[in-house]
Image (cartoon, rainbow, N blue to C red):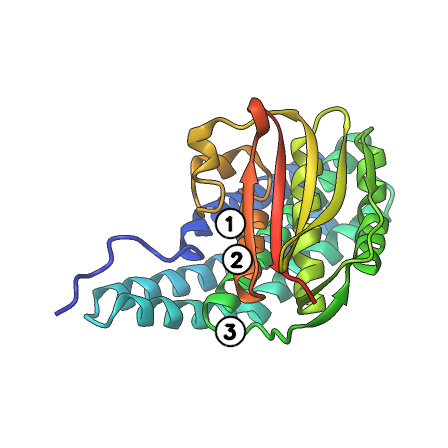
């Protein structure tokens, strides 16, 4: 009989973070109700939000029970992880609907006349929902990759077009943070799935911008034999060697420093493997960081 795994799946390991976000949403909703003086509209809106958050909690608990049941079986570990990932991937639609409803309620409430304190609470709800949605999407995507449900069709891709698209998508975030963001033009082509590659580069840029406090981020590439290495250079603080080793491990101490709990990099690493790539992170001389994605040259 094969030895049973003592660790939960990577996707299941982040359920605690999502539960904390749900509890925060409930507390903020109750705070908004108290600040509005228990008006009818406030009571109804708060009740609707709490019901939706409770529904999400129930679905997460159902998933946890499924994981616990699977862990008690004597099936091979790899097969069990695929089953767990497939289950979580299939729950994506059910969990997205309540969060989208909360976001809609918050947007509707913000359009009404509110006191300054109530408006701050609504803004807090919207921020919390945005972070919750981002974490959930990353968890679902990781589960989809593990379950073998992520489509990937490698074709020759011109990096110049991908670089331009991603720079345009992240330029506002860089400017809001007071950072420089630029790319180095290239004629290189790689063999990869265009959508998967775009998502990887987007996650790398988002991580680099979030981790940089001053200076900027540069996106470029270079040829190395039969492969092309895409690199994202970020200035700022370096990374301790012990944390570098855990950068792509879900639930590690490395991810505790980021709002997405490090899931963006974990997903990028899983996607890079899917599209025949290799992702690495280094901190040259303990300063800044460099994310390198090696792909077959087309």
Q: Residue at image x 72%, y 50%?
A: 40
Where the C terminus falls, by quadrant?
bottom right
Mark 2 and mark 1 lie on one chain; the one further toward the N terminus is 1
Q: Is residue 181 above or below residue 46?
A: above
Where on the picture, by quarter, is residue 121? top right
Position in image of residue 138 (x %, y %) = 57, 56
Position in image of residue 47 (x %, y %) = 61, 54
Q: Are marks 2 and 3 in contact (CB under 8 Å)?
A: no
Residue named by callout 2? 139
Residue named by callout 3? 90
- Per the model, the C-alpha gap separating discs 3 and 1 is 17 Å
Q: Residue furthest front?
A: 225
Mark 3 and mark 1 lie on one chain; the one further toward the N terminus is 1
Q: Are marks 2 and 1 in contact (CB under 8 Å)?
A: yes
Question: Looking at the image, which is closer to me, 140 or 150?
Answer: 150
Q: Are marks 3 and 1 in contact (CB under 8 Å)?
A: no
Dot 3 falls on a residue whose secondary structure is helix
Residue named by callout 1? 18
Question: Looking at the image, which is closer to me, 270 or 183?
Answer: 183
Mark 2 and mark 3 lie on one chain; the one further toward the N terminus is 3
Q: Is residue 203 visible?
A: yes
Q: Residues within 10 Å of mark 3 (few under 14, many from 20)?
A: few
- Per the model, the C-alpha gap separating discs 2 and 3 is 12 Å
- Per the model, the C-alpha gap separating discs 2 and 1 is 10 Å
Position in image of residue 240 (x %, y %) = 48, 26
């Amino acid at each position: 009989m094969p030895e049973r795994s003592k660790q939960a799946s990577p996707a299941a390991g982040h359920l605690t973070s999502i539960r904390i976000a749900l509890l925060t949403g409930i507390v903020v909703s109750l705070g908004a109700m108290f600040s509005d003086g228990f008006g009818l509209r406030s009571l109804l809106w708060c009740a609707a939000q709490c019901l939706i958050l409770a529904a999400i909690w129930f679905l997460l608990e159902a998933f946890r029970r499924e994981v616990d049941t699977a862990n008690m079986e004597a099936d091979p570990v790899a097969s069990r992880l695929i089953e767990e990932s497939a289950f979580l991937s299939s729950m994506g639609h059910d969990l997205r609907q309540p969060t989208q409803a909360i976001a809609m309620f918050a947007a509707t409430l913000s359009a009404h006349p509110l006191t300054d304190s109530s408006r701050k609470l609504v803004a807090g709800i919207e921020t919390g929902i945005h972070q919750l949605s981002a974490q959930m999407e990353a968890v679902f995507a990781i589960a989809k990759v593990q379950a073998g449900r992520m489509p990937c069709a490698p074709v020759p891709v011109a990096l110049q077009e991908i670089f331009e698209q991603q720079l345009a998508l992240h330029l506002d975030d860089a400017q809001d943070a007071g950072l420089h963001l630029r790319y180095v033009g290239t004629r290189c082509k790689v063999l990869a799935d265009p959508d998967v590659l775009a998502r990887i580069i987007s996650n790398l840029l988002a991580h680099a911008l979030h981790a940089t406090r001053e200076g900027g981020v540069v996106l470029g590439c270079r040829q190395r034999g039969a492969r092309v290495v895409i690199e994202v250079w970020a200035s700022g603080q370096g990374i301790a060697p012990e944390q570098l080793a855990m950068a792509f491990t879900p639930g590690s101490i490395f991810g505790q420093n980021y709002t997405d709990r490090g899931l963006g990099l974990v997903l990028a690493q899983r996607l890079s493997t899917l599209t025949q790539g290799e992702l690495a992170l280094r901190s040259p001389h303990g300063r800044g960081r460099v994310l390198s994605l090696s792909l077959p040259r087309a």
